[in-house]
Each structure stands twice: as C-alpha cells, then as structure tokens.
Amino acid sequence: MTNSLEITQASKAYKRKNQSPVQALNKIDLKAQSGDFIAVLGPSGCGKSTLMLSAGALLELDSGKIVVNGQDLSELSNSQKASFRANNIAYVYQEFHLIPYLSVIDNVRIADLALATGSETKAQEILQKFGLADRLHHLPSELSVGEQQRVALSRAIYSGAKIILADEPTGNLDAENAETVLKALKDFTEQGGIVLMVTHDDRAVAFAQKKLTMTAGQWSS
Amino acid sequence: MNLLKLIRKEIIHRKVNFTLSIIAVAVAAASWLLSEAFLKSANLKSEALIQEKVDETEAHMKKLEDDIRKSMKGLGFNIYIFPEGQDLSEVYSEGYASKTMPEEYVYKLANSNIVTVNHLLPTLTQSLEWPEHKRKVVLIGIRGQVPKSHGNPKKPLVNPVAENDMVLGYELHTSLGLKPGDKVKFMGREFNVSKTHRQRGTKDDITVWINLGVCQQLLNKEKRINSILALECNCATVDRIGEIRKELLAILPGTQIIEQDSKALARAEARNKTKETAMLEIDSIKKQQNELRKKRENMVAIMVPFVALLCMASIALLAFLNVKERIYELGLLLSLGVKTSKILFAYLIKAFLSAIIGAGIGLGLFYLSLHFGKESFFNSHSACELIQGSKIILILLAMPILAMLATWLPALWAAQTDPAEVLRHD
C-alpha cells in the first residue's frame, strides 16, 4: 500500500491573552509519500512542533488541510482521529515518554489499548531486532538512554503506523545510539513508511533524503 | 496489554496514593458504622434505664397499693351523709348542712344489712347566738351512736350527751368561767355543764354539745337531723367511696356522701402523690433521654455526612494529584489513540477498587472496635443489636459510589488532557 501525507496551506496561530497571536504555521504546504524521510529544521519556536502535532491529528488547523492516506483529518471527530492515529501515525519523542511502571515489552504493547490487534510475538521480534531481547522485563529506569529510545521506536513500529513523526529523536543520544535509531527510521521508510523528523542534529539530517527549513511558520528552503 | 493490567501496574507503582485512598474510605466507613453503633447503644441504654424505672415504679406502686389496702382494711375511715339537695359548698363554708332529713334515716341504716359502715352518729348542727350571753356559738345536738342491728357489735366510739347536760368548747367555758357541775341557761332552758373540752384550735372551741332531742326542740326541728357521721367505715377495695355510695344510695337514695379526712385517706393521697411524683420523674427521665437522644442523632446526622465529604474530598485530591503526576503518560496514551472513555474508566475502576477494599477494612475496624470496646463504649451490646445487616450492605455499596463520584472530576480532567498541549511543552 502506498502511504501519503499531504499538507495544504496549513495555518495555525496561538492566541495569547492581551497580546497579539503567534503565527506558528503560515500557509505551509508539504507532500510526502511512501519511502520519504523528511528532516524539518529551523530555530526554536519556528513552528516545527506545531507542524508535527497537526500532521499527527493532535492539533486542529485554523485553515488549510491535512490529508493522510487519503483521509482529510478535519473530517474526523475526536474519537475517529484517535482511531486513525492508532492505526496510521506514531510518534517518537526526544524525551521517549515511556511509562515508568511498565516493562519494556509492556511499553511496546501499550499500543494494544488503542489497537484491535497485537501480539506478544510481534513485540518480541521487534525488540529483538533492536537488540533488546534480553531486556524485555526491565523497567525504563533500568535502561540506558539509547535503549529507552529504541523501546520508543519499537513501540512506534509495533503499532503498525504508516507514518512516524519523530520530534528530535536523537536529541539525547550519543553517536552510536543515534545511528541505530536513524538506521531504524531509514529501514522504516524503505519498507514503505513515511518519516517526518524534526531535528537540529546534523547526523540525523544526513539520513534524510529531503531537508526543509522552517522560519516563522513558513518554509525558508 | 490490556486496561486492567495497566491499572494493576499503576496501582502497584503508585501504591502510596492508592493506599491513602483506601485509608480515607476505611476511616469513613468505620466512622459511619461506629457513629451508628454508639447511637444505637446509647439509645438502647436509655430505653433500658427508662424501662427499669418504670418496672421499679410499678413494683413499688403495687406494693404500696397492697399496703394501703391492708392498712385501710384495719383502719377504716369516716364519712358524712348529708340530706338530698344539700349544696355541699354551703357545708364547706358554714361547716354544717342547711337542709335537714328525717332522723329515721339513721335507724334505717342501722337496721339495714349494710356492711361498709359501722358507727352511726346522727347530728343536728346550727350556728346561732347564745341569747343569754350574746355570743355566736355552734350548737350540735347529738344522740350518741346508733348501734347496727346486724353484723358484729362494735364498741361505741362517741358517748351521748344526757338530756339536760351540756358540753362546752374551750373558748366558751374559759370566757364564761364555766366548769363541770355549773348550771347555765341556754335559750331559756337550764343545762348542767357535764364536760368541758381542752383547746382544739377549731370551731369545736366555740361549740355547745347538747342532747339531740333537746336540740331539735330548741330549734323547732322535731325528728330532723342535718347529717349522719359514719365512723370507721371499712372497705375491701381502694375505691371505698364508690362502694359505700353504692350501698348507701340503695338504702337512702338521694343523700350525699363525702369522706372526712382520715389517716387512710392521707395515706392513699400520699400513695397517689408518690405515684404522681414517680410518673413525673419517669416523664422527666424520658424527656431528658429523648433530648439526649435528639442531640446524639443531630450530632451523628452532622458527623456522618461530614466524614463522608471529607473522605470524598481526600479521594478527589488524591485523584487530582495522580492525574497531575501522570500528565505526560496521559498525553502519550491519548496520542497513541487510546480513547478518552478508557482513561475515564481506568480512574473510576481504580476508585471503585480502593473503595471496596477500604469499606472492607473499615468494616473490619468496626468489628475490632466493637470487640475490644464492647464493655467500655458499647454497654456490652452485641454487633447484631447495634448494626443491621442492611446498613453494612448499604455502606459496601455507598462507598464505591461516593468514591467514583469524588473521582469523577479528576477523571474527566485526565480524559480531556490535550496531548498536543502536554507534549508540546515537554
């Protein structure tokens, strides 16, 4: 199946009390399809995170359209967006956001709460691929930073997402771990997925085939 | 991975928060049950106290009535019989009846089969002026006792006054300087002073006693009397007047019967007074106990809801703290596509679990308190006496409901977490 992500004239402003609104996205356009690994660069506050959240159906645009795999996100109710997200979109965060009281395998399988299907075997296979086969029952606090990010990545892949939105995925990682994560993301795109990655990391940029720079809510390159 | 597993693991991870919720519910449940038990125990005790007092009074009154009955049987009492149509208020104010009745009434009584009256004393009494000495006196004509023809003869209590004799009260004989043996004129007729009385402090001190026949002549009331004094009447029952009246009215219809003050009467009045006092005391105790009961009930009515509210507030606060602590976790779950209803459900289920466990522990605490404090605090009443099974079931049902209600707002807050907002500021 061919995956696609299409952002058309997307605008989003954050209203502030007694102050003028902050224009986070200003008529942004983006097109991505299966195999695309896009790096989004830009200074802090330029709208990168807003772009990621909007693309992941977590934030509503003021204007414009986001179509994922043919589905216009603005046509979905909150409940439908949740289901859509569960089956199509996954996030990888800089801070990993693992649940501290769940083991590695349970953290990966947390997606089962939203998914209709899931299996222990599938989770184990993914974790094995990321070299975490012997850490299945460890808690996040017992893992290294790199291992934690690999668990987060495993969770994203386990969910069966077609699009991974990665927000500074290598921000807290050393070179070796960063490379492991980036290679995994690359593999994901080579298998037909789309990766939209926000980053400041030159190592990460090197893995992406498309680089876009954002300034004040608009593409500058 | 399922929701129940997530809930279980979260409870284990945040056991302090969960334990505090359980404790809040346990304290509320135990307080509720203990308040009810204290109240019931106190109420049972006051009921027992009142009943004890009532039983004590009844036994005492029964004994008193038996005593009165026995003493009255031996003692007897005195009654006056007055003519038909006599206004008794006149008798009370003047001291004698203004109307008269035939003297033969007394013989009728004496010759009848009447058993309730014994010594019969006919009299004719009138207040008038002693013309020879220009002073007010009470003139009483007496015959002496008329003996009953039936029943056991009784020794006479009052001696008659001879035809030409006169008996004088203290005030009269001292002021006129008369003594037994002196001759004196009264309404033109000469009398011999046969006896003088000592000071009595009553109308007797200005009374002149003469023979009934002579009195009737002097007053122009031949064969008439205005009262019959019946002395030492005996009655088997306590309602002696009723019994006597019944017997007398059968023989002398229309006459009026009143009881003269007597020891038996005084004793009966004392008994009635004692009963009255005892009943007043019982009423006072009942009133006091009811007031105390109301105060206790009011206290419980305030305390129980207060404790319940406190418990709910504690649970709500703990739930809010939990949500705050888990905000990023909630944001993550929602970003993964977990439905808001599941988040809500997770919090409510946790509240339900903590409440069921807490209620069970509260129940255990209650029974322990009852066991160890039975003598000191619960007047030795058993659990069955103090708390109904339905109350326990009510608490086991109410606690989870209250806990879920208390958790509702925090759960709603959790479910409505905006993952974008949470994750954007991370």
Image (cartoon, rainbow, N blue to C red):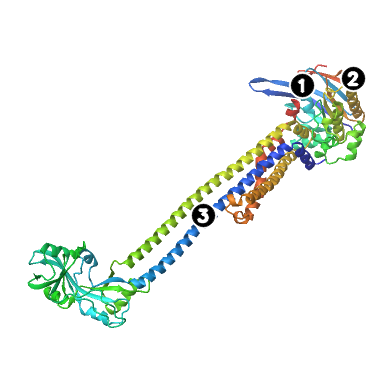
Query: Dividing the image into 4 quarters, which one contains the C terminus of chain B?
Result: top right
Quadrant where the N terminus of chain B sits is: top right
Secondary structure under tag 2 reads: helix
* B211 with respect to B242 (left or right): left
Query: How many angstroms separate mark 1 from mark 2 (CA)?
Result: 22 Å
Chain under callout 2:
A
Task: Indicate the amino acid at tag 2.
Answer: Ala
Mark 1 near mark 2, Cβ–Cβ under 8 Å?
Answer: no
Numbered label tally: 3
| Residue bearing the label numbered 1 | A47
- Image height check: is B401 above or below B116? above
Q: Do the residues labelled 3 and 1 touch (CB within 8 Å)?
A: no
Residue B2 falls left or right of residue B188: right
Question: What's the residue type where badge 3 is placed?
Answer: Ser
C-alpha distance separating marks 2 and 3: 90 Å
Identify the mark nearer the N-term, 1 or 2: 1
Instruction: Establish whether labels 1 and 2 are both on one chain.
Output: yes
Q: Position of residue A92 (x, y in %)?
A: 83, 28
Number of the front mark, 1 or 2: 2
Q: Nearer the viewer, residue A116 or B230?
A: B230
Q: Determine the residue positioned at 52% across, 47% down.
A: B298
- Residue under numbered circle 3: B46
Q: Alpha-carbon neighbours of circle 1 within 10 Å: few (<14), some, or many (≥20)?
A: many
Q: Is residue B49 visible from the viewing direction of this image?
A: yes
Tell me the CA gap for discs 3 and 1: 77 Å
Query: Which residue matches tag 2?
Result: A206
- Can you say whether A186 is above or below B148 in the image? above
